[in-house]
């Protein structure tokens, strides 16, 4: 009946549905193909003529997957004699920062690894840099910010004004700890403070160990403040002042490269947009607890 009264709308709806299904099918094929490619063929380097691998850590450190893939690719390539980690990041998640740190520690046992700091390499960015043998910063680089912060927004008063009353059914006393719809209890604050202190100690310990610095010295510098590259040099948080090219030249010297060091970047993934779209459409549904929903605990 609808098709007779509204033929154009009917056929338009049919065409729209068909186009949508076709698009989803296309994205699905790309998604499956990309996963198959990932399973069988590691990402190739952008050029096989270079001898200094450049790994970029740009923006907030949210995921370590791509960075670790790049590090491994350069580490396992015999033509690559040294790796320069170019960092331009204000920090990010503790887990991803620690994963990159561990991968660099493993890598520097086999090859020279140098960090080059851009405009900012703070918090998690410094965590990553500390794992390299040497650090090069610009005089005006913003670095440091060694510490951990946990924060959330309390929406209790707004909820009261609009008539929202939380109903909580939980399996344990602390399962809703950090809910934005109620005040944080004193014993809950203590638990969170202990968590932050533990994570901070992990950060300080790792940075001090990798930099061959007394943990007491690193602790005295790790009060969350930021430093310029110039000040960081005087505090021995970095080793030299210079730009990316300076770091590449130094990496070449340390690696004993005869001739000109030639930087090479990982091959750019031209499927990035489609794959991200596919991942969004086909990603799994995860059930998160209150703490992960409402809190940000980051190296920042």
Image (tube, grey):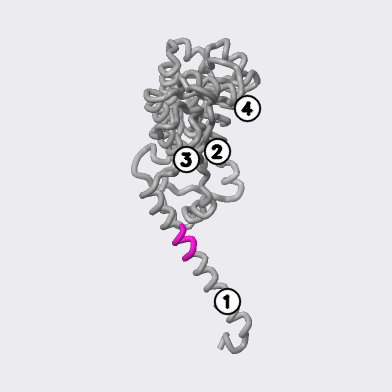
Separation of residues labelled 2 and 3 (CA atoms): 47 Å
Separation of residues labelled 1 and 2 (CA atoms): 45 Å
Whether residue 27 is in magenta: the answer is yes
Is the magenta region chiefly helix, strand or loop?
Answer: helix
Look at the numbered discs 2 and 3 and tell me whether their residues touch, using CB distance below 8 Å. no
Residue range highlighted in magenta: 25-30
**Which callout, 4 or 3, points to the residue nearer the camera?**
3
Q: Provide residue 167's location: percent of width, then percent of height.
A: 45, 49
Disc 4 secondary structure class = strand
In primary-sequence order, the first of circles 4 and 3 is 3
In primary-sequence order, the first of circles 1 and 2 is 1
User: Is 199 located above or below residue 172 in the figure?
Assistant: above
Tag 4 residue: 119
Tag 2 residue: 154
* Crowd rating for badge 3 (residues with CA inside 10 Å; few <14, some 14–19, many 20+): some
What residue do we see at 51% from left, 52% from top? 271
User: Is 299 located above or below residue 136 in the figure?
Assistant: below
Name the one closer to the observer, 27 or 227: 27
Separation of residues labelled 1 and 4 (CA atoms): 51 Å
In primary-sequence order, the first of circles 3 and 1 is 1
Please identify the residue farthest to the right as the structure is shown.
140
Whether residue 232 is in magenta: the answer is no
Q: Provide residue 196's location: percent of width, then percent of height.
A: 45, 26
Q: Tag on residue 45?
A: 3
Which of the 4 image quadrants contains residue 171?
top left
């Amino acid at each position: 009946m609808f098709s007779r009264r509204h033929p154009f709308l009917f056929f338009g709806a049919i065409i729209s549905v068909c186009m949508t299904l076709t698009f989803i099918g296309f994205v699905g094929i790309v998604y499956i193909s990309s996963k198959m490619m990932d399973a069988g063929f590691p990402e190739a380097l952008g050029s096989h003529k270079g001898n200094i691998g450049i790994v970029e850590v740009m923006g907030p450190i949210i995921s370590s997957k791509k960075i670790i893939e790049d590090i491994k690719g350069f580490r396992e390539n015999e033509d690559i004699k040294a790796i320069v980690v170019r960092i331009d990041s204000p920090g990010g998640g503790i887990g991803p920062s620690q994963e990159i740190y561990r991968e660099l520690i493993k890598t520097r046992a086999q090859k020279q690894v140098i960090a080059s700091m851009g405009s900012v390499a703070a918090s998690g960015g410094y965590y990553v840099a500390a794992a390299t043998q040497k650090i090069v910063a610009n005089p005006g680089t913003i670095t440091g910010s060694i510490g951990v912060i946990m924060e959330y927004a309390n929406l209790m008063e707004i909820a009261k004004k609009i008539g929202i009353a939380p109903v909580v059914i939980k399996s344990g006393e602390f399962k809703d700890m950090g809910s934005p719809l109620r005040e944080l209890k004193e014993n809950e604050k203590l638990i969170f403070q202990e968590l932050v202190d533990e994570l901070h100690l992990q950060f300080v310990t790792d940075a001090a160990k990798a930099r061959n610095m007394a943990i007491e010295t690193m602790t005295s510098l790790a009060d969350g403040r930021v430093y310029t590259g110039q000040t960081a040099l005087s505090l021995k948080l970095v080793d030299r002042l210079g730009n990316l090219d300076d770091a590449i030249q130094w990496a070449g010297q340390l690696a004993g490269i005869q001739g000109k060091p030639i930087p090479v970047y990982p091959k750019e993934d031209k499927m990035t947009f489609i794959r991200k779209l596919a991942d969004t459409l086909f990603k799994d549904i995860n059930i998160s607890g209150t703490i992960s929903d409402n809190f940000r605990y980051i190296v920042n």
